[in-house]
Amino acid sequence: MKKQNAAVNRKAPASAASESAKVRIRQLPSGVRGLDEILGGGIPEFSFNVIAGTPGCGKTTLAHQIVFTNATRAKPALYFTVLGEPAMKMLRYQQQYSFFDESKLGRAIRFVNLADIVMDQDLNAVLEEIIRQVTTINPAIVVVDSFRTVVRKAMNSASELEMQSFIQRLSQFLTGWEATTFLVGEYVEDEIRDNPLFTIADGLFWVWQVTERNSVVRKMQIMKLRGQASVPGLHTIRISDDGLQAFSRTLGMTGRKTKAGRRRRLSMGIPELDKMMGGGILEGDSLLVAGPSGTGKSALATQFIAEGLRQGEAAVVALFEERPDGYTTRAGNFGLDLKKPQDTGKLEVLYLRPLDLSVDETMQAILDAIERVGAKRLVIDSLVGFEMALAPGFRADFRESLYRMIGALTRAGVTILSTVEVEDSFNAMPFSHYAISFLTDDILRMRYVEIDGQLRKIMVVIKMRGGNHSKDIREYIITDKGVVVIGPRQTDYTGLTTGIPTRVGRREEPAPEPREKK
Amino acid sequence: MRDFAARLIAHESGISSDAGNGVPAFFVFEKLRPHMATLMGNGGYRALLMRTLALSVGEVPFLSSVRVSVEGTMEGLDHPDSPVDRAALLDAGVILLAHLIALLVAFIGERLTLQIVHEVWPKLAAKQLNFSIGDKENEKTKRRR
């Protein structure tokens, strides 16, 4: 009784007690780029996890990446193989990945085959062997691959209670031994409700491989993770020579700083256009340049980039149609040198047209480039090309992902110019064939008009979220200096936005580019 | 690969007290067995030995009397169907081991194979853990001839 009283008397104030009593869960790095952010920082230490999915999703590769990232001689990993992929094959294939470090095998990573015991004996013997190996090797990480094959045989003979008891005892032992565990298995989602494994597990990493038309898309979901908040939803994963890479739906930008309150006006590199825009584009704005093919959207974008470079602002150009060499050469034709800034690391021109591209990994490539060069200006040329480069399965996510990326980048102060090709209609002036204008702060529309037997070009600032702008419809031409906006015309027209205007004033001035003489 | 196999057998013969009484290569196989069984299961090691045997029979016909047990041991070389002199037995052992190591190299590569060998025979000198030592010396000898 005395002791009890002493304990009561020692009781600290509630707030202090809760601070000191709260256990701090250490997190292990997954070794998978992008995954730690999805997990909410990393893998909780001593957690009992399931990596589930259908064949070919990358479950074993994921387990290997975790093991190779964390295993050391002092804190080794024990990898139990069963009846799935034989260890010999596993080593043969996994050594092709860049994360594979053969110097860790044997000392830091031990492979043990459980197949004979699983085949010949019951679950108690399997558990005894796991306990024997774990107590001998003293691992910090334990993997059982495939756990499904461990229990498959027993499922036919053991009761559900026995199965649950086996999983419970395994979990208790491994957690008690201070091991972080991964049970790899081929499961389908329908099993989640009835399989006790998913109830007992602390973490449930589910991977999918979905075929849509000719494309294959891999996704991951953290269905459950005790002790920390993971990013919900499906995240794209890709398997390359470096193993798995995960692309968080938040694009890793949750913690990015927002731009300062007062923003500068940036020059577009076309003085007359700057005037039309009320002094230039606001720093950190997203500008959509819409127009049909050949109206000079890319030329204008190049001038925007070149002007930034002149002002010492690094830039990224993401191309989805034109090749970087052609783009650089064409800029040279306008007297804009984009080669030197590329050589000095002030400009990166990305060409993104691989097969089965996912929105998130494309955006990751852009974000990486922005990070590398410290870009202040970004051109996406064009959004239509971007969407077309995506695997069909990802196109549905396009606008949502684009919205997230543009929002996060502009909040961080990057000024974005996106081009979009629209067909000229002769009774309306659409900004885009799909609703993406909500993504942008500013819209500049370029279009063809028929005047005096010539197909000329006009532009107009449709909106500038950050302030007032010119409402004038201005004619422009493309010369060897790029897009040149012509001064206000004396001749008045009506119906310019229809493309077939009607002259309402006297003709007083010559055409900006003379007509052929008859 | 045969030079490497021969070096491994010589090393094992030097440390094994029973090596003089049987086929030295078999002591190598026996020493490898638990390690390989842990890595790939008895069945996996047995499959590897069966392939080793099949590859070796073409070069050493009397090995056809050898069987691989369920536990992954080689049986029958001590009592071949027809009498075989000791030198031929020793050579057969080298050929068997060379094929086994070559199979491992084919599956998991040189570095991992050498790592396994090093784990089983940690006292084997580092310079011995090299597949090309014997080959280079053989080439030099050939060139001299």
Image (cartoon, coloured by chain):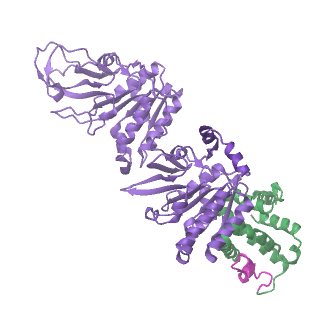
Q: Is residue A75 magenta?
A: no
Task: Give chain A's shade.
Answer: purple
- Residue at left offset 36%, top offset 41%: A400
- Residue lying at 39% horizontally and 18% vertically, measured from the top left: A265
Q: Is residue A317 left or right of residue A200?
A: left
Can residue A333 be seen here? no
Q: Quadrant of residue A76?
A: bottom right
* Residue that sits furthest to the front in the current view: A1
Q: Horizontal and vertical percent for residue A433?
A: 26, 39
- Image height check: is A490 above or below A415? above
Q: From this view, report whether residue A124 is shown above or below residue A262.
A: below
Q: How many numbered circles are shown? A: 0
Residue A469 is situated, as x and y percent measured from the top left of the image, at 28, 19
x, y percentage for residue A246? 50, 47
The relative height of residue A330 versus residue B38 in the rendered view (above or below) is above
Front position in the image: A399 or A9: A9
Which residues fall within the magenta stretch?
A: B59-80
Chain ID for green: B
Q: Residue at x 32, y 30 (%)?
A: A288
| Residue B77 among those drawn in magenta | yes
